[in-house]
Amino acid sequence: MSERRLKTRPSFPAPLLGLGFAVALSACTVGPDYMRPPAPEPVKYKELKGWKQATPLDAIDRGAWWSVFKDPKLDSLESRVVISNQTIAQNEAAYRSAQALLKEAQSGLFPTVTGNYANNDAHSGAKSSGASTGTASTLDTFKANASAAWTPDIWGKVRRSIESDVSGAQLSAADIAIATLSAQATLATAYFNLRAADALKDLLDQTAKEYQRTLTITEHQYAAGTVSKADVATAEAQLLNTQSQAINTGVSRAQYEHAIAVLIGEPPAELTITPVAFKYMLPSIPVSLPSTLLERRPDIAAAERAMQQENALIGVAVAAYYPNIGLSGLFGFAGRGGLAVSLANEVWNLGVTGAQTIFDGGLNSATVDAARATYDQSVASYRQTVLSAFQGVEDQLAALRILSQQARIQDQAVRAAQEEVDVLLNQYAAGTVAFTAVVVGQAQLLSNQESALTIRQDRFLAAVALIQDLGGGWDASQLPSTATLEGANPLTPRL
């Protein structure tokens, strides 16, 4: 009798041995641990040898880098980018999706528990079997149990998947920062282009007034019989052409204004930016050290998180070489009559399953090779991103240095051309030079003035591009931690 009880109700079920074995191995994690590979990093910027700002790095407000331009209108427009820009909204939704994928991967660490209950009443009448006599019967059965199934993460496949998904969520967070910084820089670029269009129209309007004065002088000369009608026609054509150019500036201005409206999430018809004089001072921009740049650039952070993500997936692929071990169990009660919770009605079972691929024609090997190749690809992409970042900074530092030199020379050219025109007008009024000399001189003056304005515009655009290349107001420390990723609120990087 004792032997029979041991067979039907073992005191230490054999499947528990499998459970203990699985738990003992659960600390094993296959695949390489992530280590950031080295990237090409210069000791200093080439352009800082002869051009260096003394302003400390803290001068840029990391929450509003555009404030260095000291333009209230630009400040108000930039502050609306994060709130209403639809590209940023798309990236924010992608981040929340990455958070959900992370939670989905984390669920693989835990068993699945299912509860079942069934109650069935079956009745047979006295003649239900077709016999002339019989006895009616009613059978009441019940079953209530809870079952659990668990695949222990013995080889770390789930943990590597979680590691990959954490990096993927951090990558999505960096994408938000990239999209935000890009939208802010694009808005600043459009804004200064708009202000340059305002300045060009103001220049052409002022030039038209000067040409009107020249036309008046020419008409007086013609009335006095000292010049021909051709001079009057030339002066009038010059005036009308300049007025036409002034009107044409409205096309590009309207397009910049519409672009700004879209960047802040508004219909173009609802945004009007009042023209103002383009009299801003170029700000002093602090330049971070090369090592700091790697921490400030969101695209570099994103490239690194992509590397970490792909590195973890190598471990997921390697885990396929090892057997899958599953544990299952059930405990409950079953019997006839009403639900009776008693030892006489208990039912239970424990089970262990194992599956190992014996032959797959090289599928696992190919999967691992592909994962390693993808990781190598992400490493190359990371290093290229770093190189491009330093190139962008060097480009804009060079542009600011060269444009500053060009601006000084061009301003001298404008002053010289203005002096020439003043002399020619006096000589023309005195009848000592032909009108063609005045026309050529005035055309040269306007060309020099337009060039000076273009250089000024380019310097502001280069300043915006440099701030963007330096990472703007972004900081790598804003990337979410695992704890943040598991929280309820999505990350909104402060830019």
Image (tube, rainbow, N blue to C red):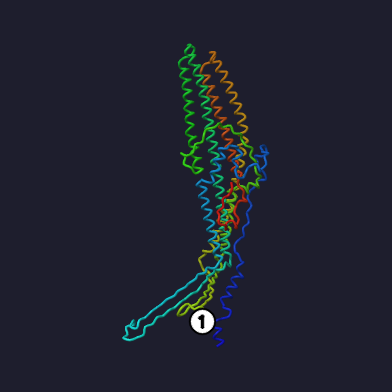
Q: x%, y% of residue 349?
A: 52, 76
Q: x%, y% of residue 388?
A: 59, 45
Q: Nearer the viewer, residue 489 or 233?
A: 489
Q: Residue at x 57, y 40 (%)?
A: 75
Question: Which quadrant: the N terminus?
Answer: bottom right
Note whether residue 82 is visible.
Answer: yes
The residue identified by callout 1 is 344
Q: Residue at x 62, y 58 (%)?
A: 34
Report the amino acid beneath label 1.
Ala
13 vs 221: above or below: below
Q: Residue at x 56, y 63 (%)?
A: 158
Q: Nearer the viewer, residue 132 or 448?
A: 132
206 vs 31: above or below: above
Q: Quadrant of residue 189?
A: top right
The number of callouts visible is 1
Q: x%, y% of residue 32?
A: 61, 60
Q: Quadrant of residue 467?
A: top right
Mark 1 surroundings: few (<14), some (14-19) or many (≥20) residues within 10 A: few
Where disc 1 sits, the SS reads: helix
In the image, is 316 to the left or to the right of 139?
A: right
Q: Extreme front residue here?
A: 338
313 vs 447: above or below: below
Q: x%, y% of residue 87?
A: 51, 47
